[in-house]
């Protein structure tokens, strides 16, 4: 390879934070685009992806290095997904190498072979007796779970059942280990739909199924706007049946891990086909095996959180996004993509329909439906004849509160509990108290690294900052005046649980938040206990607010949501309306009538009155009109530059330099507004000072052209090396 005409070049994208690719020499035959190669990079060795086979390079030949190893004989990504990833890097202004790396399972990033192992799973033996000694509750739980069919080892671990438990059952010849995918590899020929689990559709559901089914084999975007309890899941299931019968696959995106077990169970009851999950609680090997199973066509249905969007499929026939409004579909670190928005593009590239389902659609989705980009289908009736819950607002000004509960709410709880029903209380603050206060001098325990106070966690006897995760022991006395009169201020879920245990000792209480569900299996165990009636009083944060079906819950109380009424973020009212509607939807989902009680110091607030009397749909229309008048998204498009540094002057200098460049470039792009820079609402977090600069335009292409010219100039700033910074296109959080 001494002559230029004989040189074989590869253009490689590497997982580094630089917006460029790198040229390497390679022996013939060249691997196609989409294959992994190992290359020398400085003093290290990196795994990158082939992008192109250029004829020439801007780097002199004698300075080019040769690749170390070709890791794949064929591209890892199908053509449509490859195109989606490259488009995403351009749209979100993120380095291509990091975008591609983000789409790969960890083991493939490290250079492991793209080979699937058997999917370790368990099933009941033919003559299995599910009644075993009470002293082995985990074994009993495992046997009960397997009654619905085989489960993978990963799914069993999510329920808190480790491999040692399964091995003991295997030794008793009650269960046997299998490869689930090998067992069901012929699912296309023998797909079985369990008709006993199929529900009769009402007119609205049947119309939605018929309309979407007509779009099979071509792209179309549908917004399934159905009130809570209207049977959206049954619509999903009946949409999937003809897709699976054609031998195609289905991708189901859910907002969080907590919703995957119940979704998985419902789907398994309906279809005798390989159904896999993909989320962060799985280990690296399990994630790779699921990823490869979908790519090879061995899996029929994949249920996953946002990153599952980048899973390759052999033949993708339908994309479903449940709770499409949920903010967790937006990645907030690194590659800041929005899974819902990219799912629409993937559906277009894969020529398959995309269904966005929600009881409280995002305003962006409603706007897209109104301008014809999405077809809107509505479900206005609760399934099974259940009636919408009655709603009340309690004015708690001048009212004595017990752990945040007004006497009237306590009386209502007593009434519903005595009637044999369940009660759910929503409080979106975990811990025992919001802060620890000295009653003598007023000192408050503040985080040394953030402009925030420590939250008092009584269970762990620690003070915990929920912003930087730092912790410290609770002091025995005030460090300022020496007093031992330290008291909590503000209410958290721990304090509410303690108060309810004393107030209603005859009924069992369960608390569901991040603290009470840290160990594997705890969340599903608590949820199953609620469904089985073991708990009568439910306390929860947002984890309990969406997607769960508790037919015996007849009273829902929201203790304190006033903070969102006066937030500086223009999206706060939308999120509050969605949260209220979702939480309220947990009440009266079966034949029993439901009641929703909202406590507030501002019952006259227009947002609350609008929600109570007119519902989410009317609120959304009003809010969209307000945003149109103010020129806010979805009637404009935004990008947010965030920066942080240990020293305030360094982050200030960088942001001023970046803003100066923006003002210069605006002369060529007059439609782009530059707002800021300003300090973040919490200026200091995790020991670093934070600032932000907002860019906005009424036209998406204009903003994109501006960013393409501005970002390279920002990267060249000397002050850019003194601060950590990132760009967030279509930001969902401004503060």
Image (spheres, rainbow, N blue to C red):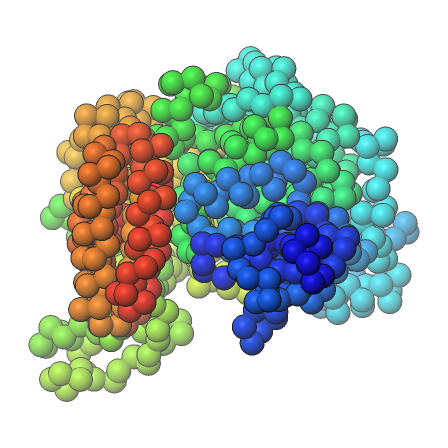
How many numbered callouts? 0
Image point 32% across, 67% down: which residue? 721
On screen, 211 above or below 623?
Answer: above
Q: Is residue 276 visible?
A: no
On screen, 690 above or below 547?
Answer: below
Residue 181, image x and y in percent? Answer: 80, 47
Residue 67, image x and y in percent? Answer: 67, 64
Quadrant location of the N terminus?
bottom right
**Which quadrant of the view contains residue 23?**
bottom right
Q: Is residue 640 visible?
A: yes
594 or 381: which is nearer to us?
A: 381
- Whether residue 524 sits left or right of residue 217 in the image: it is left
Image point 65% across, 56% down: which residue? 4
Image point 86% across, 57% down: which residue? 176
269 or 372: which is nearer to us?
A: 372
Q: Which residue of the protein is positioned furthest toward the front in this rendering?
A: 3
Q: Which residue of the protein is positioned furthest toward the left in this rendering?
A: 441
**Which quadrant of the view contains residue 101?**
bottom right
Residue 327, image x and y in percent? Answer: 40, 44
On screen, 484 above or below 560?
Answer: below
- Whether residue 109 sits left or right of residue 669 in the image: it is right
Image point 32% across, 59% down: which residue? 716
Residue 686, image x and y in percent? Answer: 31, 69
């Amino acid at each position: 390879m001494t002559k230029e005409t004989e040189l074989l070049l590869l253009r490689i994208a590497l997982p580094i934070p630089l917006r460029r690719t790198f040229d390497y020499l390679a022996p013939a035959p060249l691997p196609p685009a989409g294959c992994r190669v190992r290359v020398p990079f400085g003093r290290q060795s990196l795994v990158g992806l082939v992008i192109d086979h250029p004829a020439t390079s801007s780097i002199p030949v004698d300075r080019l290095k040769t690749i170390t190893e070709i890791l794949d004989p064929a591209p890892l990504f199908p053509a449509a997904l490859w195109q989606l990833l490259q488009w995403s890097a351009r749209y979100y202004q993120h380095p291509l190498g990091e975008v591609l790396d983000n789409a790969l399972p960890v083991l493939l990033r490290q250079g492991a072979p793209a080979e699937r192992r058997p999917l370790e799973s368990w099933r009941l033996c033919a003559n299995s007796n599910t009644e075993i000694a009470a002293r082995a509750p985990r074994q009993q739980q495992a046997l009960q779970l397997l009654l619905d069919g085989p489960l993978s080892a990963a799914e069993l671990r999510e329920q808190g059942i480790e491999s040692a438990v399964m091995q003991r059952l295997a030794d008793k010849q009650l269960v046997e280990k299998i490869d689930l995918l090998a067992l069901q590899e012929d699912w296309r020929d023998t797909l079985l739909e369990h008709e006993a689990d199929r529900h009769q559709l009402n007119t609205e559901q049947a119309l939605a199924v018929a309309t979407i089914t007509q779009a099979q084999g071509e792209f179309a975007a549908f917004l399934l706007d159905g009130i809570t309890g209207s049977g959206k899941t049954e619509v999903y299931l009946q949409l999937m049946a003809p897709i699976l019968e054609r031998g195609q696959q289905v991708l189901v995106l859910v907002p969080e891990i907590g919703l995957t077990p119940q979704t998985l169970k419902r789907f398994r009851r309906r279809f005798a086909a390989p159904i896999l999950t993909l989320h962060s609680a799985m280990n690296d090997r399990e994630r790779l095996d699921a990823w490869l199973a979908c790519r090879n066509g061995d899996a029929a249905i994949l249920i996953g959180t946002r990153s599952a969007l980048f899973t390759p499929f052999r033949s993708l026939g339908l994309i479903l996004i449940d709770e499409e409004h949920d903010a967790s579909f937006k990645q907030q670190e690194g590659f800041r993509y929005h899974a819902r928005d990219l799912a629409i593009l993937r559906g277009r590239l894969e020529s398959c329909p995309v269904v966005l389902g929600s009881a409280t659609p995002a305003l962006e989705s409603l706007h897209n439906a109104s301008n014809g980009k999405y077809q809107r289908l509505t479900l206005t009736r609760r399934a099974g004849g259940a009636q919408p819950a009655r709603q009340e607002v309690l004015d708690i000004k001048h009212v004595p509160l017990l752990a945040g509960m007004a006497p009237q709410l306590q009386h209502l709880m007593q009434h519903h509990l005595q009637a044999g029903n369940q009660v759910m209380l929503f409080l979106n603050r975990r811990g025992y108290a919001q802060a620890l206060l000295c009653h003598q001098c007023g000192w408050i325990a503040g985080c040394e690294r953030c402009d925030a106070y420590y939250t008092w966690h009584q269970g762990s006897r620690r003070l915990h900052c929920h912003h930087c995760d730092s912790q410290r022991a609770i002091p025995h006395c005030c460090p300022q005046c020496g007093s031992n009169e330290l008291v909590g201020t503000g209410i958290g879920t721990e304090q509410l649980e303690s108060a309810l245990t004393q107030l209603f000792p005859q009924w069992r209480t369960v608390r569901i938040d991040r603290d009470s569900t840290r160990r594997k299996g705890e969340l599903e165990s608590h949820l199953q206990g609620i469904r089985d009636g073991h708990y009568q009083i439910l306390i929860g944060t947002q984890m309990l607010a969406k997607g769960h079906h508790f037919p015996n819950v007849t009273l829902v109380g929201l203790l304190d949501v006033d903070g969102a009424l006066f937030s500086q973020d223009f999206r706060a009212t939308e999120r509050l309306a969605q949260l209220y509607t979702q939480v309220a939807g947990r009440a009266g989902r079966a034949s029993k009538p439901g009641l929703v009680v909202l406590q507030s110091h501002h019952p006259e607030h227009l947002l609350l009155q609008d929600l109570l009397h007119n519902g989410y749909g009317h609120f959304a229309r009003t809010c969209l009109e307000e945003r149109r008048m103010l020129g806010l998204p979805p009637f404009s498009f935004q990008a947010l530059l965030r920066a942080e540094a240990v020293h305030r002057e360094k982050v200030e200098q960088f942001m001023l330099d970046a803003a100066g460049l923006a003002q210069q470039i605006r002369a060529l792009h007059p439609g782009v507004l530059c707002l800021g820079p300003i300090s973040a609402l919490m200026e200091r977090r995790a020991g670093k000072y934070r600032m932000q600069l907002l860019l906005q335009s009424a036209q998406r292409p204009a903003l994109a052209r501006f960013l393409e010219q501005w970002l390279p100039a920002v990267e060249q700033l000397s002050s850019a090396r003194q601060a950590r910074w990132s760009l967030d296109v279509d930001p969902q959080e401004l503060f």
